[in-house]
Amino acid sequence: MGRTLVVVGLVVAAVGAVMMLGLPLGRLPGDIVVSRGRGTFYFPIVTSLVVSVVVTLLLSLFRR
């Protein structure tokens, strides 16, 4: 359990560092944004796919 918490913490810190460097995580091409009147609907589908692939790769590396 402790190792998992450390890994999750490192991943969160790495994502934060990358976002501070200027990677537009959350505003990738392919994300759906619909603005009408006062409301805005935002669905980050491509961002979700990228995060899913990265997490899957990291977990597969740590399970070996």
Image (cartoon, rainbow, N blue to C red):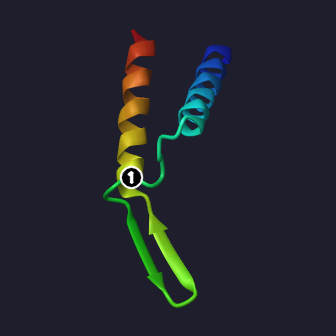
Residue positioned most to the front: 22
Element on which disc 1 rests: loop
Q: Residue at x 68, y 16 (%)?
A: 2
Q: Position of residue 15 (x, y in %)?
A: 55, 33
Q: How many numbered discs sit on the rendered protein?
A: 1
**Where 13 sits versus 61, above or below?**
below
Q: Position of residue 24 (x, y in %)?
A: 47, 47
**Where 29 sits versus 58, above or below?**
below
Q: Residue at x 52, y 40 (%)?
A: 22
Q: Nearer the viewer, residue 1 or 46?
A: 46
Residue positioned most to the left: 30
Q: Residues within 10 Å of mark 1 (few under 14, many from 20)?
A: some
Q: Nearer the viewer, residue 35 or 43?
A: 35
Return the residue at label 1. Answer: 28
Quadrant for residue 3, please give it. top right
Q: Position of residue 16 (x, y in %)?
A: 61, 35
Q: Nearer the viewer, residue 57 or 4?
A: 57
Q: Is residue 8 left or right of residue 35?
A: right
**Where 33 sits versus 26, above or below?**
below
Quadrant for residue 56, please give it. top left
Quadrant in the picture for the N terminus? top right
Q: Position of residue 30 (x, y in %)?
A: 31, 58
Q: Is residue 8 left or right of residue 33?
A: right
Question: Label 1 is placed on what type of residue?
Answer: Leu
Q: Residue at x 47, y 41 (%)?
A: 23
Q: Is residue 42 left or right of residue 17?
A: left
**Where 12 sits versus 49, above or below?**
above
Q: Nearer the viewer, residue 56 or 35?
A: 35
